[in-house]
């Protein structure tokens, strides 16, 4: 895949994440659930690899914050989830492993990292258990959507994983 093609695909995934955040979200306890972010993370991790997936997650988080569609919580869950999705896929070559990596990275590790970030930015110390359920709901739905898409994926570029 050429660099131009890869950058174009990364830009398209970023756009899907931004538009998805604007229209598809729901309250999940103390956070908002943005399942399209997690769907994009898994798709990018499988089709492009862990580093591009993390860059896409960062860009989506940054643009969501600049557009008023998100908070600083978009960064830890999205980026760590994308990284683990890409690494789990790379290690196993299984799309379901990428989905598991997304959920673990977001709902467990991302929730742990979110606690000091919220305390720093909002001055309100919260328990980790406040984030885990919301992050788990959002990442699980998004990962499931990605698996549905990957099951039917037949691109002429990028790995398709297991069928």
Image (tube, helix red, strand yellow):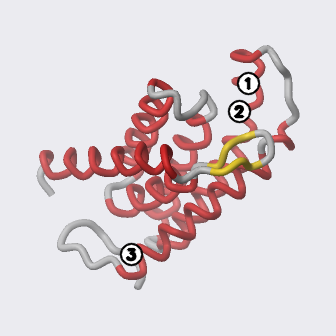
How far is the residue under mark 2 from the one under mark 3? 31 Å
**Could you say where residue 42 lies in the image, as x and y percent from the top left?**
47, 59
- Residue sitting at 64 percent across and 62 percent down? 140
**Could you say where residue 144 lies in the image, as x and y percent from the top left?**
57, 70
Say which of marks 3 and 1 sits in front: 1
Vertically, is 132 above or below 160?
above
Q: Secondary structure at mark 2?
A: helix
- Residue sitting at 50 percent across and 45 percent down? 21
Circle 3 residue: 161
Mark 2 crowdedness (10 Å alpha carbons): few <14, some 14-19, many ≥20: many
Circle 1 residue: 118
Task: Between residue 142 and residue 156, name the one nearer to us.
Answer: 142
How far is the residue under mark 3 from the one under mark 1? 36 Å
- Residue sitting at 49 percent across and 34 percent down? 61
Vertically, is 18 above or below 1?
above
Q: Are marks 2 and 1 in contact (CB under 8 Å)?
A: yes
How far is the residue under mark 2 from the one under mark 1? 6 Å
Question: Which quarter of the figure is the N terminus placed in?
Answer: bottom left
**Could you say where residue 52 lies in the image, as x and y percent from the top left?**
35, 45
Circle 2 residue: 114
**Could you say where residue 139 lies in the image, as x and y percent from the top left?**
62, 56
């Amino acid at each position: 895949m050429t660099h131009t093609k890869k950058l174009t695909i990364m830009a398209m995934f970023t756009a899907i994440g931004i538009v998805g955040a604007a229209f598809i979200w729901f309250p999940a306890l103390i956070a908002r659930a943005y399942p399209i972010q997690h769907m994009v993370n898994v798709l990018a991790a499988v089709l492009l690899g862990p580093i591009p997936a993390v860059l896409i997650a960062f860009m989506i988080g940054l643009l969501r914050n600049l557009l008023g569609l998100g908070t600083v919580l978009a960064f830890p869950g999205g980026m760590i989830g994308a990284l683990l999705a890409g690494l789990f896929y790379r290690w196993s070559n299984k799309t379901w492993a990428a989905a598991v990596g997304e959920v673990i990275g977001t709902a467990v590790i991302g929730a742990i990292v979110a606690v000091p970030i919220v305390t720093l930015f909002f001055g309100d110390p919260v328990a980790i258990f406040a984030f885990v359920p919301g992050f788990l709901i959002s990442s699980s739905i998004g990962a499931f959507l990605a698996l549905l898409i990957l099951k039917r994926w037949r691109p002429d570029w990028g790995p398709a994983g297991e069928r």
